Image (tube, rainbow, N blue to C red):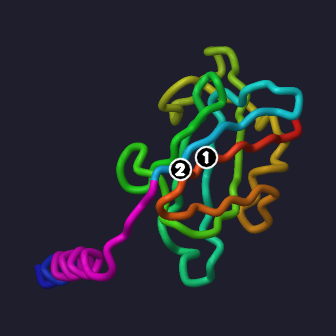
Amino acid sequence: MARIIFCCALAAGTLVLAGCGDDVTTTVASGTVRTDSGTPCDGALVVFHPQESERVNDPKPVATCDDQGKFTLTTFQKDDGAEPGKYGVTVVWQAKVKAGRLSLSSESEPVGKDQLKGKYGKPASPLLTAEVTAGSPNTFEFIVEK
């Protein structure tokens, strides 16, 4: 019983601490991802990784490209954008596969290998970068090699 009370107290304390600190302000950030031949990267996952040392553990803005390769970043709420700052950007564009290859863990359409061969999916050494600035349009165009 004491163990349960301790765990509940620890969880409550964690929630209180998580609510403390600076208010985070995001700004709308969007863009497109296309191959060097102009093909939209339909369904590609785009992740912005904070580059400043004090922000490396901050939430990472993410988006999924639509059929035109367009995306709008989400950090806390849908399409709220990203905090101002410098980012390394990763893109993973998984191929769609036939439904017969669906696994129990899949939550949507089955996917295959990264069509970009992992080249743009390395957060520790991103090939793409972006800087989100407050009060200005943050529209990015990423051209990737397939």
Q: CA distance from mark 1 to mark 2?
A: 6 Å
State the residue position of label 2.
Answer: 29
Viewer-nearest residue: 120 or 78: 78
Would you name the residue on which mark 1 appears?
139
Q: Residue at x 38, y 55 (%)?
A: 76
Residue 31 in magenta stretch: no
x and y percentages locating residue 109 in the rendered image: 56, 23
Residue 72 place in picture, x, y as percent? 52, 42
Q: Which secondary structure lies at badge 2?
A: loop
The one nearer the camera, 12 or 141, is 141
Q: Is residue 15 magenta?
A: yes
Left or right of 54 in this view: 90:
right
Q: Is residue 73 left or right of residue 12?
A: right
Residue 98: name its quadrant.
Answer: top right
Query: Which badge, 1 or 2, comes first in the chain's sequence?
Result: 2
Question: Which residues are the magenta region?
Answer: 8-27
Cβ–Cβ under 8 Å for marks 1 and 2: yes
Tell me if mark 2 has few (under 14), some (14-19) or many (20+) residues whose alpha carbon lies within 10 angstroms of its own. many
Tell me where residue 103 appears, x and y as whole percent. Answer: 58, 29
70 up-or-down from 134: above or below: above
